[in-house]
Image (spheres, rainbow, N blue to C red):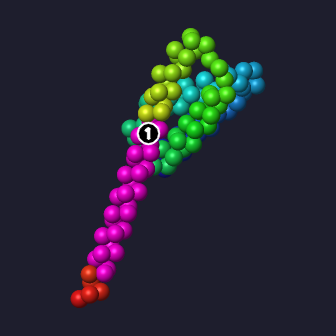
Amino acid sequence: MKLFSKYLKAVILCSVVGFCASCTNPKQEAVNRLRALFEDAKANSKTYTDEQWMIYLVEYQQVDSLLSEFVFSDNELAEISPMKGRCSAYALKAKAVRDSHQIDNALHDSRGVFKGFESGLK
């Protein structure tokens, strides 16, 4: 839980810093948020909990939506595209982790149902 709190504080701090930067340049703020998201996932994604993956997905969707509002030069795209691609890959991983846990929970629940059903027949 302490790691989650640390992660949440980092996301909030990045958002605040990004918000302050957005007062001058919303386009740069969007890029800064993408960079912060990318750097955090690169450094910490191996230890993310389910909750952290959900936070990541929400932040990723917000950043992706922000970036779609702007037109970037070829030089800017050279910097942004690789980060956006990696963030997209992390988002797919987050969805896969979430789905695998849902499947695992469903299998666990169905085993309990079958055991209960079987014991009811005896």
In the image, residue 22 above or below residue 11: above
Rendered location of residue 78, percent (x, y) = 52, 14
Tell me what residue is drawn at x 67 percent, y 28 percent: 69
Rendered location of residue 75, percent (x, y) = 56, 11
Q: Quadrant of residue 104?
A: bottom left
Tell me what residue is drawn at x 57 percent, y 42 percent: 58
- For this orientation, the residue located farthest to the right is 23
Which residues are drawn in magenta? 90-117
Q: Quadrant of residue 117?
A: bottom left
Rendered location of residue 9, percent (x, y) = 58, 39
SS label for mark 1: helix
Q: Main secondary structure of the magenta part?
A: helix
Q: Say which amino acid is labelled 1.
A: Leu
- For this orientation, the residue located farthest to the left is 122
- Residue that label 1 marks: 92
Q: Quadrant of the C terminus?
A: bottom left
Does the segment drawn in magenta span residue 32?
Answer: no
Rendered location of residue 33, percent (x, y) = 60, 29
In this rendering, the count of numbered labels is 1
Tell me what residue is drawn at x 55 percent, y 36 percent: 60
Q: Is residue 38 visible?
A: yes
Looking at the image, residue 71 sits to the left or right of residue 87; the answer is: right
